[in-house]
Amino acid sequence: MPEGDAVYRTARRLREALDGRALTRSDFRVPRHATADLTGRTVLETTSYGKHLLTRVEGGLTIHTHLRMDGRWVVMPEGRRMPGGDLVRLVLANAEWQAVGVRLGMVDLLRTDREDTVIGHLGPDLLGPGWDQAEAVRRLREHQDTTIGEALLDQRNLAGIGTIYRAETLFLRGVSPWRPVGGIDDLDGLVSLARRLLEANKHHASTVTTGDRRRGYETWVYGRAGRPCRRCGSRIRRGEMGSRPQERLILWCDHCQRD
């Protein structure tokens, strides 16, 4: 699933193509909003919140989308042929550009003053202008007995971290993903590092946590299961965390991240 930095970049592409321009076409290909027509309305603002996208238009309306596992937004010149089949869930077009939402996991049209119904449950956005680290740490501390690996992926605690940044943050802090939240002394430092990693990558297409952008050198543990740890030489471990059907991939080094 795309993480906060990738969704941030998607919002930027949509913003560049749509913001400040009147829609010449809107095509909601989901049953709930199939009759909605936003033609003539100007797109006011496109922003991200964690892994969610919000496109606000004239008339006090917001288009809420979520990519989930397979979704993506494709921005192309207006008039260019779009992907075929039933993959397209939403099209927003103006005189110059068309934004095509492919395999979107969520598509909602709601009043802007009701955005809290789709994102109000989320914790602070790691890449948001209103980032509140103290609140994120407070929410994490409410789950003393939960493993830190599970707590970091719970978007109700802090929004934007996925399996990549979870694995990399915990490795760099030397914390086992299986350690309970209550057993971590410096949650502030851990959360601060997670935010710095996302900030460092939000303008780049690839995720780099090592500082080395050469192919194959970008990460410490993610994508390296069974390979030697870059620090100690031990084999990187791979497993799953979380209860079914919500279990997610986790990678770690037993030596560098002791429980």
Image: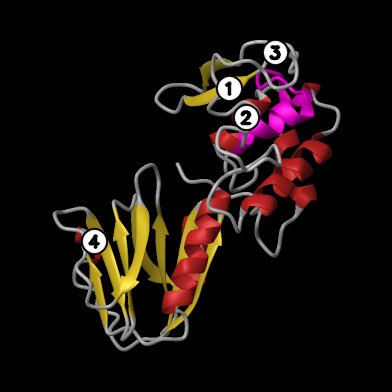
* Mark 3, secondary structure of its residue: loop
4 vs 1, front mark: 1
Query: Coloring scheme of the render?
Result: secondary structure
* Mark 2, secondary structure of its residue: helix
Q: Residue 152, how many percent across, how many down? A: 63, 35
Residue stretch rendered in magenta on the structure = 165-182
Calculate the distance from the C-alpha at mark 3 to the C-alpha at mark 2. Answer: 17 Å
* Mark 4, secondary structure of its residue: helix
- 170 falls in the magenta region: yes
Calculate the distance from the C-alpha at mark 1 to the C-alpha at mark 3. Answer: 15 Å
3 vs 2, front mark: 3
Q: Nearer the viewer, residue 139 or 216?
A: 216
Mark 2 surroundings within 10 Å by alpha-carbon count, few (fewer than 14), some (14 through 19), many (20 or more): many
**Pointer 1: what residue?**
251
First in residue order: circle 4 vs circle 2: 4
Mark 3 surroundings within 10 Å by alpha-carbon count, few (fewer than 14), some (14 through 19), many (20 or more): few
**Pointer 2: what residue?**
167
Marking on residue 32: 4
Can residue 62 be seen here?
A: yes
Marking on residue 233: 3
Q: Nearer the viewer, residue 126 or 165?
A: 165
Q: Does the residue at mark 4 contact the one at mark 1 (Cβ under 8 Å)? A: no
Can residue 121 be seen here?
A: no
Q: Does the residue at mark 2 contact the one at mark 1 (Cβ under 8 Å)? A: yes
**Is 211 left, or right, of 89 in this rendering?**
right
Q: Amino acid at mark 3?
A: Gly
* Mark 1, secondary structure of its residue: strand
Q: Amino acid at mark 2?
A: Ala
Marking on residue 240: none
